[in-house]
Image (cartoon, rainbow, N blue to C red):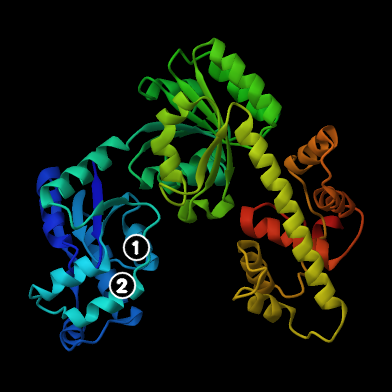
Amino acid sequence: MSMALLVMGVSGAGKTTVGRLLAERLGCRFLDADDFHPESNVRKMASGQPLTDEDRWPWLEALAKALGPEPRVVLACSALKEAYRARLREARPDLRIVWLDAPPEAIRGRVLNRSHPFMPASLLESQFRDLEPPQQAVRVDATANIQDVIASILDQLEGARMTIGVIGLGRMGRNIALRLQRDGHTVVGHDASVAALDEAQQAGVATRPSLKDLLESLPRPRRLWVMVPAGEPTETTLRDLKGFLTPGDSVVDGGNSNYEDSIRRASDFRRLGIGFLDVGTSGGIWGLDGGYCLMIGGDETWVGQWLPVFRSLAPRADAGWVHVGPSGAGHYAKMVHNAVEYGMMQALAEGLELLRAKPLVTEVASVVEAWRHGSVVRSWLLDLAAKGLRDEPDLASLAPHVEDSGEGRWAVQESVRLGVPAPVLAASLYTRFASRQQDSFALKALAMLRREFGGHSVRRKDDQR
């Protein structure tokens, strides 16, 4: 079985020692990134000058080239920035990260008490400034006893591995499969679409042509993550699964199902001895690298069995996922989340149109860019708005047609049923209905934002002719 590990951390964390021991224990080739620096980098560091990104790119290219052909390899490398790790991951999509973390004062003490061929202690502060903690990593305390460090790493590498079947390999399903693989899980996927199967295979996901083939390929108890459109596609998929699954197996519905359907489905599976969790999943097309926010509903026992998966999918193992309550609670939380999203997008879109309405503001895109830094309204949605306006300042190619995927409607209906006033959520939903009948920059901006965060299709003016 192939394996690629990156042992990272600042100078003095013990990367080389840990990397060599891991390579020996795991039967891997060991590579020390220091051996790949060009002579110009060595001279610069020896003189006490920190390397720039421009200095590091040739070094990273050499490392990527060395990683590619090695079936089993451990690389000891500082890899302080996410961009550096991303370049190495391009060469090895299966790359897993081991982060040797420690308080700065402990590392300073180590560096002062040792000699290094070309890393004077004065450069250490620049490394701490550059360090961007990895979002997915086996994290260990670098100050612990070396044998304890190795044992902890091996335990985490082994203990977190699961085999998961992913049903639905569209935009999010495929990225969920890839993110799980990056963190060491074994993934086998299936989709009713031949095109989706082909795209998943090209991306490196193992697939099976039928549901039956998928289930026969998984070890028992089987773990299935369903990521298909809400409504009848999900209903059909879960109904078909009942004919194959046996007690002890479990299913996650990670789509945008109605919470009442999830309560009913959990009850149906419970009678069969099969676990069922409803997991509201947010992150759109950016989740592969940034991680997903997970709102989990269901029995705590089943949640515990799926913890390694949730920790791998979330932005961090200890943040971005939450067990919100019993069956149905996960999709209820996601319903409210998406309704809030509607309202935030609506406010931003209306503000953009108001900026454009008076020629006093000549550069709307520049205003939005400025808002991203230090303003009260800075947010990821604002970041996406800035990107969309940079790409097309007047949004001329977009039709002001904004779809709604269901959760906003359900949230407004729920507010009526509970007697909870939600005028902003309701107004944002009704504006989406109105978008199918009129033309405005605000509605084009809403369409653009949906495209930017979720990869959702948009209508262009040519489509309406």
Q: Residue furthest right?
A: 437
Residue 453 in picture, x, y percent from top left:
62, 57
Mark 1 lies on a secondary structure that is helix
Amino acid carrying mark 2 in the image: Phe
Give the residue drawn at x 35%, y 45%.
Answer: 183
Give the residue drawn at x 26%, y 68%.
Answer: 104
Report crowding for label 1: few under 14, some 14 to 19, many 20 or more residues within 10 A (C-alpha).
many
Q: Residue furthest top?
A: 271
Q: Residue furthest bottom?
A: 47
Q: Nearer the viewer, residue 362 or 145?
A: 145
Amino acid carrying mark 1 in the image: Arg
Residue assigned mark 2:
128
Mark 2 lies on a secondary structure that is helix
Give the residue drawn at x 27%, y 42%.
Answer: 156
Where is 271 relative to 252, above or below?
above
User: Would residue 431 appear left or right of 366 to someone viewing this image?
Assistant: right
Where is 238 relative to 394, above or below?
above
- Labels 2, 1: front one: 2
Residue assigned mark 1:
85
User: Would residue 45 appear left or right of 97 to someone viewing this image?
Assistant: left
Residue 382 in picture, x, y percent from top left:
66, 67
Q: Nearer the viewer, residue 222 or 457?
A: 222
Q: Earlier in the sequence, mark 2 or mark 1?
A: 1
Residue 164 in picture, x, y percent from top left:
42, 32
Q: Quadrant of the N terminus?
A: top left
